[in-house]
Amino acid sequence: MRRRGAFRLVTCAVCAVALCAPLAPAAAGAATQTAGPCDKDWVEPTPAEIAVTSVPITVASTVDDYFVLYVKHDRGNDVVLDVPVLVKRGEPGTTALSENLRPLSADKYRVHKYRVDDPADVDGDCIDDITEVDDFGYRNPVNRAESVKVRYGAVAIPDRETFEKFSYQGKNVGSDQYLKDLEYIKFNVLNIWSDRPRLWFQDTVWRGWHWSFHNVGLSHVWRCCGSGWARGVLIYHPNVVASDGSLGVYRWEFQSYDDYNFREIELVNEALASAMPFTKDNLAYYPSIGWKPLKKYKNQKSKYDASRVNILLSKDIRPDVPYVSYNAAEGYG
């Protein structure tokens, strides 16, 4: 797997009225908000700015605090965006704020501190940060996508166990012949061309087709505010070597006929990484399905080389070796 440079934005830091009203909680124990960010009399709290002088980032904290980690992105023409990538409750004494991608230099980060009893709404979805942090998986504080019922999928995958629960394993689904015997999850991205893409993972065991998740899980979203719908698949390769030399890579790709540029790829890569905190820089974009994605990658390779988007190619999955066994086994005679 090839390592690339710095990534870009996933969502906007400014609270705005959500395009669609959030669903009522479907899971037992999910928090219900009676008053919050999109009420007309709500006043957004002013955060305390915490200076970042070194990486890894550790801040002084109490359990009454919570923190938002932003990554600075220079878009040119004097435009610098602060992109929230992590929301974390404070711990007694100190709190470590880290990403699951290769760290940048200290000047590329920004940290805001808020009070737990007066939370903000950094992703602008009309649900406060603490409600989303405490219900991570069903909700996601840096993903503006609204929650769906757990039988359909999720807006975040907190751990490997959840990935296994949602993933399809062992045989084909419909015409997806190349997915045979692979462990994978399908995902959907809405508003892919905006600076606030919204990401959903679907329970691929029960919703094997993208359209089935669209029609059942998100039909109301597409009716009210849908544009730029992208469909992809996330595949786990347990025996592919990651950039740090460890085994296990999560490869993601769009459908072969989708035609996206580096900007969209970068946005989705960031959204996936933020929504899958159990990954450790072993997430990789795979541009080798269909001629369009591979051609786009080759034409824009310099941009990928300067980013933090890891690239996985066919030769990384199937190395050029003189012999590959069809069935591995032991025999005695």
Image (spheres, grey):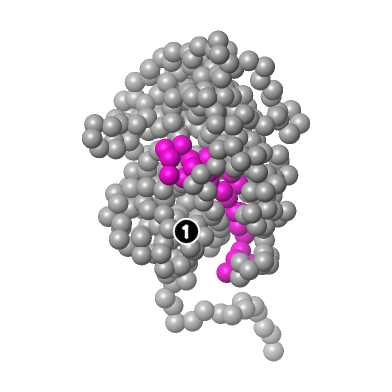
Q: Residue at x 49, y 24 (%)?
A: 16
The residue that mark 1 highlights is: 258
> For this rendering, which residue is in front, 178 or 241?
178
Residue at the front extreme of this rendering:
223
The x, y position of residue 265, in whole percent, is: 42, 50
Q: Residue at x 62, y 54 (%)?
A: 210
| Magenta residues, start to end | 178-201
Q: Label 1 neighbourhood size at 10 Å, few (<14), some (14-19), many (20+)?
A: some
Quadrant in the picture for the N terminus: bottom left
Q: Is residue 312 above or below residue 70?
A: below
The x, y position of residue 273, in whole percent, is: 49, 43
> For this rendering, which residue is in front, 48 or 120?
120
Q: Is residue 61 above or below residue 55?
A: above
Q: Examine the structure image and report whether residue 86 is included in the region drawn in magenta.
A: no
User: What amino acid does circle 1 point to?
Assistant: Asp
> For this rendering, which residue is in front, 20 or 274?
20
Residue 268 at least partly seen: yes
Q: Is residue 149 left or right of residue 14?
A: right
Give the image quarter of residue 126: top right
Q: Residue at x 66, y 20 (%)?
A: 33
Q: Examine the structure image and report whether residue 182 is included in the region drawn in magenta.
A: yes
Q: Residue at x 51, y 33 (%)?
A: 142
